[in-house]
Image (tube, rainbow, N blue to C red):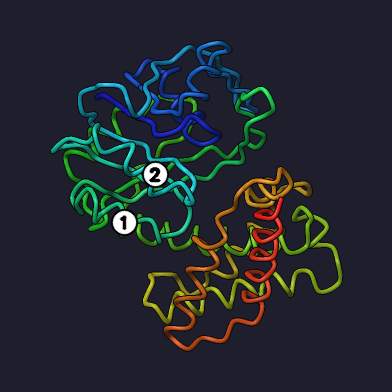
Amino acid sequence: MRILVLGAGGIGGYFGGRLVEKGEDVTFLVRSRRKTQIEENGLNIHSINGDFSCTPKLITKTDNADSFDVVLFSTKAYHLEEAINDLKPFVGEKTVIIPLLNGVAHLSPLQQEFGQDRVIGGLCFIETTLNEGGDIVQTSKAHRLLFGEFNQTKTDRVERIAETFSGTKASFVLSDHIVQDMWHKYLFIAAMSGVTTLMRAPIGPIRETDGGQEFIKSLLEEIAQIMRAYGAPVVDHIVEEHMKTMDSLSYDMKSSMQRDMEKGLQIEGEHLQGYLLKLATEYSVETPLLKSIYQNLKVYETMLSKG
């Protein structure tokens, strides 16, 4: 299968790189600056799961290319509209798009542009970033990508994709309940990014302070209440499960949103916490903790816009 990875950052570069490492036919759709950087230095992965370097196939939005069989859509949410426009020339009648963004707000724009049949569910669990030289640094054992049909069936196309993705050093998993997986991750990442950005600290110090565990659990319960009011398929005991996961995280674990804030970069607050607050308003759910977190993110964005 011909695979197109939209972006060669921490997520797209890592999972796409692992597929290149296996020997699959992978092309990266990147901006001109990133293309030059990779052509000069290579695509380099520094990982607890094994290092890898290569000079992959690269294209930009102005290049001519045939349509691809599979697209790993790994852009940041604030680049969603631009990324959709960049991708259009490379999507054919049978192209399957696997979005790896956090949350769910991106699904409607993707489906409206490319059609519901071309977009399936996807998400990933990984802690990764780019260093100053543009290399991908992956620091925890988790490097799992899930995908599946929204109607929970194992179609011929997803089974072919699963076969193509198999045998890599990363974990590519065909899920039987991808919609639930996406909402469960949304709950976790909205809480994790929320507390770490609000407290300006990794998860360890937050857990250890008096009231820290209670704050995390209360935030998870607020978000879960929103999701249940909306009708999302979250299980009854998901807060308890996520609390166990929070407890198991390394002391110095940071959310990607926190790392972006430390670098003075754009963040996905509107896409994650902002979208949840819109649902909370629509379904009359009280969310004092989430509102405080969102306000903190908006203050950051205001300061960022003023330089």
x then y, percent, for residue 148: 30, 48
Q: Nearer the observer, disc 2 or disc 1?
A: 2
Q: Farthest residue to the left: give it.
A: 93
Q: Is 85 displayed left or right of 185 in the figure? A: left
Question: Is 237 placed above or below 153 here?
Answer: below
Q: Quadrant of the N terminus?
A: top left
Considering the numbered disc 2 on the image, is that residue within a helix, a strand or a loop? Answer: helix
x then y, percent, for residue 295: 66, 71
Q: Where, by quadrant of the figure, is residue 140 drawn?
A: top right
Q: Which mark is residue 109?
A: 1
Q: Which mark is residue 20?
A: none
The residue shown at (55%, 66%) is 273
Q: Is 259 displayed left or right of 111 in the figure? A: right
Q: CA distance from mark 2 to mark 1?
A: 12 Å
Three-letter code for the amino acid on which mark 1 is drawn: Pro
x then y, percent, for residue 245: 63, 57
Three-letter code for the amino acid on which mark 2 is drawn: Glu
Q: According to the image, label 2 marks what residue?
A: 82
In-front residue for pair 125/299:
299
Question: Is 187 placed above or below 44 here?
Answer: below
The residue shown at (51%, 24%) is 34
Considering the numbered disc 1 on the image, is that residue within a helix, a strand or a loop? Answer: helix
Question: Is 262 placed above or below 216 here?
Answer: above
